Image: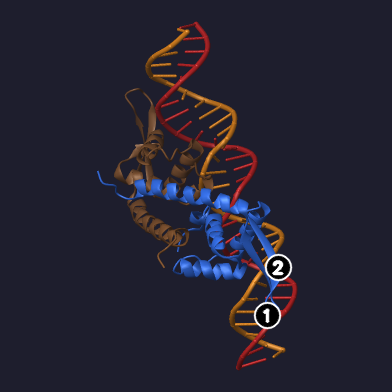
Chain colours: A blue, B brown, C orange, D red
DNA sequence: TTGACTACCTTGGATAGCATGGTACATAAT
DNA sequence: ATTATGTACCATGCTATCCAAGGTAGTCAA
């Protein structure tokens, strides 16, 4: 496991990336994130829902209610045009950050 | 630039890594981090000193005052045995975290 | 009707980054 | 002389955000 602080700042990038491929509802997102990360990420509700709300508030996501065959109400989130633009920047941010961190953390060739 | 949240959870790993190579004082650390990251990281005092104090409080670092030829008092920090053990775990944490994140963020081979 | 699972949400605590402002000494510039 | 710049350390207060904990409510099988 990892300390929760490590996730800070990456949550939104991860969520947007997955939702950019295909709109999903909350619970589905949790499972999908776990599956794609090889079981590493297990988002808690207390992390997921506030993050989705922030992204929706900022106009990067839009949500719509749908009703499943079972009768369950589900809120599907999809990435807006604004969110798509933001995602490009966030991915670039992650790449340059991890590149810089690895320069320090990994023994570089002298 | 990156959002400050991204740094959360990585600061201690970065500091310990650099100090494990060679004990340094605060100001020197700031410059060294910047140099080794290709100019990417520019630690603020408000980030650095509280972090050093936390690491010292937790016994991962030890500090000793020295006086430079100029007369300047400097506090050199070096990694303790406990800090060395912790660093191993932190490096492993970073590797697995970034590996998992890249599984999601980078378009993997189908 | 009990239990397990799905699905959403909110509140409050804790942490950590950092803007800001402070102290103090050394050295260079005006 | 005084001002400015650089070095070197530290503390206070704000903010963002992760998430533990707790709640509601529907589905479905035993």
Q: Secondary structure at mark 1?
A: loop
Residue position for label 1 = A69
- Residue beneath the point at 37% across and 44% down: B62
- Residue beneath the point at 57% across and 62% down: A19
- The front one of B103 and A110 is B103
Farthest residue toward the left?
Answer: A110
Residue position for label 2 = A65
For label 2, count other residues whose C-alpha is less than 10 Å away and answer few (under 14), some (14-19) or many (20+): few
- The front one of D23 and A22 is A22
- Residue beneath the point at 40% across and 65% down: B109
Image location of residue A107, percent across then percent down: 29, 49
How many discs mark residues in the rendered view? 2
Q: CA distance from mark 2 to mark 1?
A: 13 Å
Image location of residue B93, percent across then percent down: 40, 58
| Vertical placement of residue B49 versus C21, above or below | below
What number is the disc on residue B73? none
Q: Is residue A4 visible?
A: yes
Image marks 2 and 1: residues in contact by CB distance under 8 Å: no
| Vertical placement of residue A21 versus B66, above or below | below
- Residue beneath the point at 60% across and 53% down: A83
- Give me the chain letter of mark 2: A
Image location of residue C15, percent across then percent down: 53, 52
- For this view, does A36 lie left or right of residue A107? right
Image location of residue B84, percent across then percent down: 33, 52
Q: Is residue B59 visible?
A: no
- Of the 4 image quadrants, the one containing the C terminus of chain A is top left
- The front one of A93 and A2 is A93
- For this view, does D15 lie left or right of residue A98? right
């Amino acid at each position: 496991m990892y300390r929760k602080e490590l996730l800070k700042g990456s949550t939104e990038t991860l969520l947007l990336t997955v939702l950019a491929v295909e709109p999903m509802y909350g619970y589905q997102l949790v499972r999908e994130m776990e599956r794609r990360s090889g079981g590493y990420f297990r988002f808690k509700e207390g992390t997921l829902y506030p993050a989705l709300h922030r992204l929706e508030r900022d106009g990067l996501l839009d949500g719509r209610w749908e009703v499943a065959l079972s009768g369950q109400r589900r809120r599907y989130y999809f990435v807006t045009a604004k969110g798509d633009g933001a995602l490009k920047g966030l991915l670039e941010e992650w790449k340059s950050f991890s590149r810089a961190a690895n320069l320090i953390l990994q023994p570089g060739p002298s």
